[in-house]
Protein backbone atom coordinates (compact mmCIF):
# COMPACT_ATOMS: atom_id res chain seq x y z
CA UNK A 1 0.00 0.00 0.00
CA UNK A 2 1.19 3.49 -0.85
CA UNK A 3 1.30 6.10 1.84
CA UNK A 4 -0.31 9.53 1.45
CA UNK A 5 3.09 11.19 1.02
CA UNK A 6 4.03 8.82 -1.80
CA UNK A 7 0.73 9.46 -3.57
CA UNK A 8 1.24 13.22 -3.30
CA UNK A 9 4.81 12.90 -4.60
CA UNK A 10 3.69 10.75 -7.53
CA UNK A 11 0.91 13.21 -8.40
CA UNK A 12 3.37 16.12 -8.21
CA UNK A 13 5.78 14.30 -10.55
CA UNK A 14 2.99 13.59 -13.03
CA UNK A 15 1.88 17.24 -12.98
CA UNK A 16 5.47 18.45 -13.45
CA UNK A 17 5.91 16.04 -16.36
CA UNK A 18 2.72 17.27 -18.02
CA UNK A 19 3.76 20.90 -17.55
CA UNK A 20 7.18 20.10 -19.03
CA UNK A 21 5.61 18.39 -22.04
CA UNK A 22 3.15 21.23 -22.64
CA UNK A 23 5.86 23.88 -22.41
CA UNK A 24 8.66 22.23 -24.37
CA UNK A 25 7.04 19.78 -26.81
CA UNK A 26 6.11 21.20 -30.21
CA UNK A 27 2.51 21.89 -31.13
CA UNK A 28 1.77 21.70 -34.86
CA UNK A 29 -1.04 23.81 -36.31
CA UNK A 30 -2.16 22.99 -39.85
CA UNK A 31 -4.75 25.24 -41.49
CA UNK A 32 -6.29 24.67 -44.92
CA UNK A 33 -9.34 26.87 -45.45
CA UNK A 34 -11.21 28.11 -48.49
CA UNK A 35 -13.92 30.79 -48.29
CA UNK A 36 -16.19 31.67 -51.20
CA UNK A 37 -19.07 34.05 -50.54
CA UNK A 38 -20.58 32.64 -47.33
CA UNK A 39 -19.32 29.06 -47.74
CA UNK A 40 -16.27 27.93 -45.77
CA UNK A 41 -14.59 24.60 -46.47
CA UNK A 42 -11.37 22.99 -45.33
CA UNK A 43 -9.90 21.85 -42.05
CA UNK A 44 -7.88 22.87 -39.01
CA UNK A 45 -5.59 20.25 -37.43
CA UNK A 46 -3.74 20.54 -34.11
CA UNK A 47 -1.09 17.92 -33.28
CA UNK A 48 0.76 17.46 -30.01
CA UNK A 49 2.89 14.37 -29.41
CA UNK A 50 0.66 11.42 -30.31
CA UNK A 51 -2.57 13.41 -29.87
CA UNK A 52 -4.41 15.06 -32.72
CA UNK A 53 -7.54 17.19 -33.04
CA UNK A 54 -9.13 18.20 -36.32
CA UNK A 55 -12.04 20.43 -37.23
CA UNK A 56 -13.49 19.96 -40.72
CA UNK A 57 -15.63 22.61 -42.43
CA UNK A 58 -18.06 21.52 -45.12
CA UNK A 59 -19.65 23.88 -47.67
CA UNK A 60 -23.29 24.47 -46.87
CA UNK A 61 -26.07 23.15 -49.07
CA UNK A 62 -27.78 25.93 -51.05
CA UNK A 63 -31.20 24.53 -50.22
CA UNK A 64 -30.47 24.45 -46.52
CA UNK A 65 -29.12 28.02 -46.59
CA UNK A 66 -32.32 29.26 -48.24
CA UNK A 67 -34.48 27.49 -45.72
CA UNK A 68 -32.35 28.92 -42.93
CA UNK A 69 -32.88 32.43 -44.25
CA UNK A 70 -36.60 31.81 -44.49
CA UNK A 71 -36.67 30.58 -40.91
CA UNK A 72 -34.76 33.62 -39.72
CA UNK A 73 -37.14 35.93 -41.62
CA UNK A 74 -40.14 34.12 -40.16
CA UNK A 75 -38.74 34.37 -36.64
CA UNK A 76 -38.10 38.08 -37.13
CA UNK A 77 -41.68 38.65 -38.29
CA UNK A 78 -43.03 36.72 -35.32
CA UNK A 79 -40.92 38.76 -32.93
CA UNK A 80 -42.13 42.01 -34.50
CA UNK A 81 -45.75 40.87 -34.31
CA UNK A 82 -45.39 39.78 -30.72
CA UNK A 83 -43.75 43.10 -29.90
CA UNK A 84 -46.67 45.08 -31.37
CA UNK A 85 -49.22 42.95 -29.56
CA UNK A 86 -47.49 43.29 -26.18
CA UNK A 87 -47.56 47.11 -26.27
CA UNK A 88 -50.70 48.49 -24.72
CA UNK A 89 -52.31 51.69 -25.92
CA UNK A 90 -51.47 54.66 -23.72
CA UNK A 91 -49.02 52.74 -21.55
CA UNK A 92 -45.88 54.70 -20.73
CA UNK A 93 -42.86 54.13 -18.54
CA UNK A 94 -42.83 55.72 -15.11
CA UNK A 95 -41.21 59.14 -15.11
CA UNK A 96 -38.96 58.32 -12.19
CA UNK A 97 -37.59 55.25 -13.93
CA UNK A 98 -36.74 57.23 -17.05
CA UNK A 99 -34.95 59.92 -15.08
CA UNK A 100 -33.01 57.33 -13.09
CA UNK A 101 -31.92 55.56 -16.25
CA UNK A 102 -30.89 58.84 -17.86
CA UNK A 103 -28.88 59.78 -14.78
CA UNK A 104 -27.17 56.41 -14.74
CA UNK A 105 -26.22 56.76 -18.39
CA UNK A 106 -24.88 60.26 -17.73
CA UNK A 107 -22.81 59.06 -14.81
CA UNK A 108 -21.28 56.24 -16.85
CA UNK A 109 -17.60 56.88 -17.38
CA UNK A 110 -16.11 56.86 -20.84
CA UNK A 111 -12.68 57.40 -22.27
CA UNK A 112 -11.94 60.78 -23.80
CA UNK A 113 -9.92 61.56 -26.90
CA UNK A 114 -6.83 62.41 -24.86
CA UNK A 115 -7.13 59.03 -23.10
CA UNK A 116 -7.06 57.20 -26.44
CA UNK A 117 -4.01 59.21 -27.49
CA UNK A 118 -2.29 58.34 -24.21
CA UNK A 119 -3.15 54.64 -24.65
CA UNK A 120 -1.77 54.71 -28.19
CA UNK A 121 1.59 56.14 -27.12
CA UNK A 122 1.79 53.86 -24.08
CA UNK A 123 1.21 50.54 -25.86
CA UNK A 124 2.60 51.31 -29.32
CA UNK A 125 6.19 50.22 -28.65
CA UNK A 126 5.44 47.23 -26.34
CA UNK A 127 2.75 45.99 -28.72
CA UNK A 128 5.11 46.19 -31.68
CA UNK A 129 7.81 44.43 -29.64
CA UNK A 130 5.32 41.73 -28.65
CA UNK A 131 4.34 41.24 -32.29
CA UNK A 132 7.99 40.88 -33.37
CA UNK A 133 8.72 38.44 -30.57
CA UNK A 134 5.67 36.35 -31.43
CA UNK A 135 6.57 36.18 -35.11
CA UNK A 136 10.17 35.21 -34.33
CA UNK A 137 9.08 32.43 -31.97
CA UNK A 138 6.61 30.90 -34.42
CA UNK A 139 8.13 28.43 -36.87
CA UNK A 140 6.40 28.46 -40.23
CA UNK A 141 7.17 25.50 -42.47
CA UNK A 142 5.06 26.67 -45.38
CA UNK A 143 2.16 28.99 -45.97
CA UNK A 144 0.14 30.81 -48.57
CA UNK A 145 -2.77 33.23 -48.44
CA UNK A 146 -4.82 34.56 -51.37
CA UNK A 147 -7.37 37.24 -50.54
CA UNK A 148 -9.89 38.99 -52.78
CA UNK A 149 -11.63 41.80 -50.93
CA UNK A 150 -13.85 44.77 -51.58
CA UNK A 151 -15.90 47.20 -49.50
CA UNK A 152 -18.98 49.24 -50.47
CA UNK A 153 -16.89 52.43 -50.58
CA UNK A 154 -13.86 52.30 -52.95
CA UNK A 155 -12.00 54.69 -50.63
CA UNK A 156 -12.39 52.24 -47.73
CA UNK A 157 -11.17 49.46 -50.02
CA UNK A 158 -8.03 51.48 -50.76
CA UNK A 159 -7.38 52.07 -47.06
CA UNK A 160 -7.88 48.38 -46.30
CA UNK A 161 -5.57 47.50 -49.20
CA UNK A 162 -2.72 49.55 -47.74
CA UNK A 163 -3.28 48.06 -44.28
CA UNK A 164 -3.30 44.46 -45.56
CA UNK A 165 -0.18 44.96 -47.65
CA UNK A 166 1.59 46.25 -44.54
CA UNK A 167 0.44 43.29 -42.41
CA UNK A 168 1.26 40.60 -44.96
CA UNK A 169 4.56 42.29 -45.79
CA UNK A 170 5.51 42.06 -42.11
CA UNK A 171 4.53 38.39 -42.02
CA UNK A 172 6.64 37.66 -45.09
CA UNK A 173 9.57 39.44 -43.45
CA UNK A 174 9.53 36.98 -40.55
CA UNK A 175 8.25 33.92 -42.45
CA UNK A 176 10.30 33.54 -45.62
CA UNK A 177 8.26 30.53 -46.76
CA UNK A 178 4.99 32.45 -46.54
CA UNK A 179 3.61 33.88 -49.79
CA UNK A 180 0.50 35.96 -50.38
CA UNK A 181 -1.59 37.49 -53.13
CA UNK A 182 -4.00 40.39 -52.51
CA UNK A 183 -6.68 41.32 -55.05
CA UNK A 184 -8.58 44.51 -54.20
CA UNK A 185 -11.93 44.89 -55.96
CA UNK A 186 -13.11 48.47 -55.98
CA UNK A 187 -16.40 47.74 -57.77
CA UNK A 188 -17.67 44.85 -55.67
CA UNK A 189 -18.31 43.99 -52.02
CA UNK A 190 -16.62 40.63 -51.51
CA UNK A 191 -14.32 38.70 -49.20
CA UNK A 192 -12.87 35.49 -50.66
CA UNK A 193 -10.01 33.72 -48.95
CA UNK A 194 -7.67 30.79 -49.55
CA UNK A 195 -5.38 30.06 -46.60
CA UNK A 196 -2.86 27.29 -46.19
CA UNK A 197 -0.37 27.28 -43.32
CA UNK A 198 1.75 24.83 -41.33
CA UNK A 199 3.04 26.41 -38.11
CA UNK A 200 4.97 24.91 -35.20
CA UNK A 201 4.69 26.37 -31.70
CA UNK A 202 6.69 25.81 -28.51
CA UNK A 203 5.00 27.56 -25.62
CA UNK A 204 8.13 28.15 -23.51
CA UNK A 205 9.49 30.52 -26.16
CA UNK A 206 6.58 32.91 -25.63
CA UNK A 207 6.95 33.23 -21.85
CA UNK A 208 9.71 35.92 -21.84
CA UNK A 209 7.97 37.89 -24.61
CA UNK A 210 4.61 37.70 -22.83
CA UNK A 211 6.02 38.70 -19.43
CA UNK A 212 7.94 41.60 -20.96
CA UNK A 213 4.74 42.84 -22.58
CA UNK A 214 2.52 42.44 -19.51
CA UNK A 215 5.04 44.03 -17.11
CA UNK A 216 5.75 47.02 -19.34
CA UNK A 217 4.98 50.33 -17.61
CA UNK A 218 2.88 51.62 -20.49
CA UNK A 219 0.78 48.45 -20.59
CA UNK A 220 0.30 48.57 -16.82
CA UNK A 221 -0.79 52.22 -16.99
CA UNK A 222 -3.23 51.37 -19.77
CA UNK A 223 -4.65 48.44 -17.85
CA UNK A 224 -5.10 50.57 -14.72
CA UNK A 225 -6.78 53.29 -16.78
CA UNK A 226 -9.26 50.81 -18.27
CA UNK A 227 -10.01 49.23 -14.91
CA UNK A 228 -10.49 52.63 -13.27
CA UNK A 229 -12.81 53.77 -16.09
CA UNK A 230 -15.02 50.71 -16.58
CA UNK A 231 -15.14 49.17 -13.13
Image: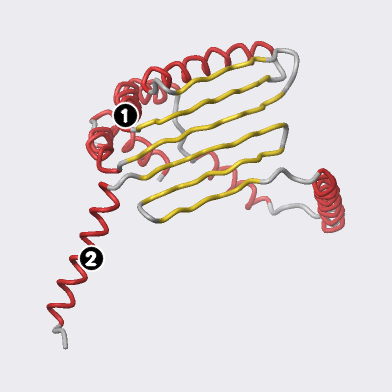
Image position, residue 213 (x, y; %): 27, 33
Q: Mark 1 or mark 2, which is nearer to you?
A: 2
Mark 1: secondary structure: helix
- Give the quarter of the image for residue 8: bottom left
As drawn, is 80 to the left or to the right of 2? Answer: right
Mark 2: secondary structure: helix
Q: Is residue 38 above or below residue 21?
A: above
Image position, residue 186 (x, y; %): 70, 12
Residue identifier under label 2: 14
| Identity of the residue drawn at 26% across and 38% down | 205
What residue occupies the far front of the structure in this picture?
50
Spatial CA distance of label 1 from label 2 is 32 Å
Residue identifier under label 1: 130
- Give the quarter of the image for residue 122: top left
| Identity of the residue drawn at 56% across and 37% down | 32
Q: Is residue 44 above or below residue 13?
A: above
As drawn, is 149 to the left or to the right of 87? Answer: left
Q: Quadrant of the image for the N terminus?
A: bottom left
Evaluate if marks 1 and 2 touch, with contact meaning CB atoms under 8 Å apart: no
Label disc, if present, on residue 94 of the rendered structure: none
As drawn, is 205 to the left or to the right of 66? Answer: left
What residue occupies the far bottom of the structure in this picture?
1
> Badge 1: few (under 14), some or many (20 or more) residues near its Cα, within 10 Å?
many
| Identity of the residue drawn at 60% across and 29% down | 194
Please, which colouring scheme is shown? secondary structure
Earlier in the chain: of badge 1 and badge 2, it is 2
Question: How many numbered marks appear?
Answer: 2
Image position, residue 165 (x, y; %): 51, 15
As drawn, is 91 to the left or to the right of 191? Answer: right
> Badge 2: few (under 14), some or many (20 or more) residues near its Cα, within 10 Å?
few
Amino acid sequence: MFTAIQVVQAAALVIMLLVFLVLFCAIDLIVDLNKRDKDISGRIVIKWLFLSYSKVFYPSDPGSSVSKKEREAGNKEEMEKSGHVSVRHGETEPEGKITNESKSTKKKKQLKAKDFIKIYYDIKKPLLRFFKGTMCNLRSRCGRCDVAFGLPDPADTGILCGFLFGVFGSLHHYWQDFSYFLEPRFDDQVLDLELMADVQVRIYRFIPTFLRFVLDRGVLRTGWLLVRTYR
